[in-house]
Image (cartoon, rainbow, N blue to C red):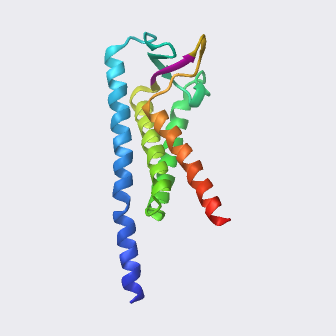
Amino acid sequence: MASKQMARRSASAGSGLAPWMGVAVIVILLDQITKLIILKTFAYGEFHRITSFFNLVLVYNRGAAFSFLSSADGWQRWFFTALGIIAAVVILWLLKRHSGQKLFCTALSLILGGALGNVIDRVIYGHVTDFLDFHLNNWHWPAFNAADTAITCGAILLILDELRRVKRGK
């Protein structure tokens, strides 16, 4: 009897991975499609004003968030690629172990898709393509992309999930 329950749990945990992988694949597709559109439409550095606080612009980031290490000698390409792959493996393991926790897994799936979207750029181009430029007067946030947006949303959901978990524990 116990072995049947374990087998059922194991089977449901494995099949429970599919929706989360689906979310990650959707993020990757949206990220890569939007980047291709920008790459085909814009010249490097070209921008189009959309609103008083938002532009579309084509820029490349050889580093990480906020262009961290972007001026390094090139080793950062492979470092951040490896870091993204390691993060993906850890996230897949967490998704498999916690596939029934919807908010937690949604967060991880968004982060997974975003991380892999940027890994794809690093492998193919040697840099990440960014194009979303928000600004206030002359102060600009670093440009970012759909993958970065998914990672940020995933991180916010992870915080909300943890706050909810802590609140339940009181």
Q: Nearer the viewer, residue 11 or 119?
A: 11
What range of the chain is rendered magenta? 130-135
- Asked if residue 112 is positioned above or below residue 167 in the image, the reply reads above
Q: Nearer the viewer, residue 14 or 106?
A: 106
Tally of numbered discs: 0
Locate residue 18, reporting x and y percent: 34, 57
* Residue 128: % across, % down: 46, 27
Image quarter where the N terminus lies is bottom left
Q: Is residue 146 above or below residue 56?
A: below
Image point (37%, 39%), residue name: 28
Residue 105 in percent (x, y) is at 46, 55
Residue at x 37% of width, y 26% of height? 35
Please name the residue shown 37% across and 47% down the image: 23
Quadrant including the C terminus:
bottom right
Residue 58 image offset from top left, x and y in percent = 43, 17
Position of residue 7 relative to residue 166, above or below, is below
The majority secondary structure of the magenta stretch comes to strand
Any magenta on residue 132? yes
Residue 131 included in the magenta stretch of the image:
yes
Q: In the visual, does 103 lie left or right of 168?
A: left
Q: Residue 9's image quarter?
A: bottom left
Residue at (37% x, 62% y) in the render: 16
Q: Residue furthest bottom?
A: 1
Please state if 117 lies on the left or on the right of 80 as rendered.
Answer: left
